[in-house]
Structure formats: C-alpha cells, structure tokens
Image (cartoon, rainbow, N blue to C red):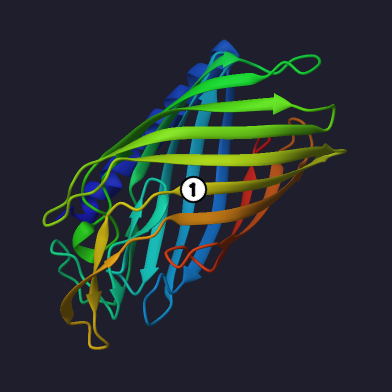
Amino acid sequence: MRSHGSARFILSVAVAIGCAAAACGAATGAQFDLRFAIEHLEGEFDSFETVKVSQVPIDISFGGLSSRFSIRAPYLRITRTGNVVMTADGPAVIGVGGAGRPQYQTSAAGSSESGLGDVLLQDETFFLRTGKGKTPALSLLLDYKWAVADEKDGLGTGEYEWGAGLRYVQPLSVRWRLTASALRRFMQDPPGMIFQNRWISSLGLEALTTGSLIRIRFEHQPPILDEVPVFDQAGVPTGMLQESDDRLFGRFDWVTGKAGGGSFLLGLWGGLTDFTEEYGFALSWSTTAQ
C-alpha cells in the first residue's frame, strides 16, 4: 500500500520539476501553462447503483515550437469503488451488478474513497504545425502513468501504464478544422487480473469564432477486460462472467479567452454504451489557450 506521505512526496517532486522547467522555459522563451480543473462523471456502468467519479487535477506544461511536456496530478474521489477503476484514459469497468471489489482492494466494496490520483506525464512532439491555407498538423504523443494512487482504497490499479500514438489536425477552412488521434495503451496487470493493451481513438470537429472555440469530439476505448465478474445485490460474486463493452462517449467543449490572457473551458459529455458514464462535465481555467 502506498502511504499518503509517499504520495505527497511524489506530487511535490512532480510540481518541483514543473516549476523548475517553467523557470528554464521562461529563460529560453518556452511557453509555460498552468491549468486548474474540476471534473465529474457518473453512471451505473451496468451496475445496480450509480458510480460517481470526481477529480480536481492540476496540470503544469511547458514547451516551444518543437515539443510540449506536461505533468497532471489529480485529487480523486470515487463513490462506490470496486466496479470501476481509474486508468490514464478515465474509468474502466472491472465488475457489474452489485458492489464489487478486486483482489487487491482492501477497503469495503461500494465504499467512498478519496486521495491523490495517479500522476500522468505527457510529451507531444510536433512533426508538422498548421500554417497558411490547409497545412495540417501532425504530432507524436507519449505518456506514462505514475501509479501513486492507493489501489487498496480502489483509487487506481497500483500498476503503471504507458502510451504512444499520433494526433492529426486538418484545417478545412479559416474557421473549421478536423481532428483525429490514435494511441496504443500498454497496461500492467494488477493481482488477479489480466488487462488488455488497447487502441484509444478519437475524431473531432472544431469551429473557431471570435474569442472562442467550439469543439465536438467522439472517443472510443476498448475494455481492459474481455469479461468482468457479476456480483449479486449483496456484493457477493455469483461466479458468472459478463462480456465487456467499449467505453464510447461524445464530448462538447466551449473555450473562451484572449490570447496571452488565459482561457476558460466548459466541457459536457455523454456516454453511448452501458459500460460508459451517463454524463460528465468539466470546468477549467488555464493561463493559455486550451
């Protein structure tokens, strides 16, 4: 079990690295960004009762014309732990029906737990950047999930994850552009489970208006388990397994702000399968555009 002291230490190191990099970036002309957010989602995830996941992440990022590096550290709360677990890409279903509990979790099934979530380190290297006309943008995405969340409280898997992929942006006109991404997620297995490596993909459309950005995006995530255990109303394993479904959702973002003066984001999304949250929302403020 990871102690809260260790988690705080790791978070402090991450923030220190970000601040040091920000100082270096300021000296070399690199752009620094600080982002605060509140995110919440909830749904049954094919269980008998509603599961709620809330987090307050802090993002520190810096970079220039060739690349951008970021550190994301969230404070996390899950109501009804055990049926879903947080991954680098959001909640994933690991049990359906009544309150469940994976082998590595020691807190009571279906309890409410909170604490530091896993820290995500991300790097984006730009191969192409949009310019005049319809010049597209293409970038390489790399990330690493630092498993500092307390898996015994059901806040994480206790194992690291990492991913590699590409992001593509194609301008369609002065105001419209198409976005797409594909990332291969590599999973480590916690005790008693064998997680699948999977492709995370998204497709979106953005509209640029005076002082704001409107973005619509659909994201697809295959399940991390082929089949998940079924629990009865009392939370006892029935011995049955249910075939897993994909996590698929549509998201709408509205971003407003001024160049160099910070920006505000309102995000709303809804799930399109039984293994996806029913709805979610996000509010965030950033020192630069989002």
Residue 119 sits in quarter? top left
- The type of residue carrying mark 1 is His
Indicate whether 125 appears above or below 267: above
Indicate whether 17 appears above or below 7: above
Q: Position of residue 139 (x, y in %)?
A: 53, 21
151 horizontally vs 87: left or right: left
153 horizontally vs 85: left or right: left
Q: Which residue is identified by label 1?
A: 220
The residue at 21%/42% (across/down) is 188
Looking at this view, name the residue that lies furthest to the right. 210
Indicate whether 166 appears above or below 54: above
130 horizontally vs 3: left or right: right
Residue 230 sits in quarter? bottom left
Q: Position of residue 23 (x, y in %)?
A: 50, 22
Q: How many marks?
A: 1
The residue at 22%/58% (across/down) is 151
Indicate whether 206 appears above or below 239: above
Crowd around label 1: few <14 · some 14–19 · many ≥20 (10 Å): some
The residue at 79%/36% (across/down) is 258
Looking at the rendering, in which quadrant would you find the N terminus?
bottom left
> Is label 1 in a helix, a strand or a loop?
strand
Looking at this view, name the residue that lies furthest to the bottom. 234
Give 118 or 278, whichever is nearer the viewer.
278
Q: Position of residue 184 (x, y in %)?
A: 38, 34
Residue 53 sits in quarter? bottom left
Looking at the rendering, in which quadrant would you find the C terminus?
top right
Q: Position of residue 131 (x, y in %)?
A: 74, 15
Give 230 or 74, whichever is nearer the viewer.
230
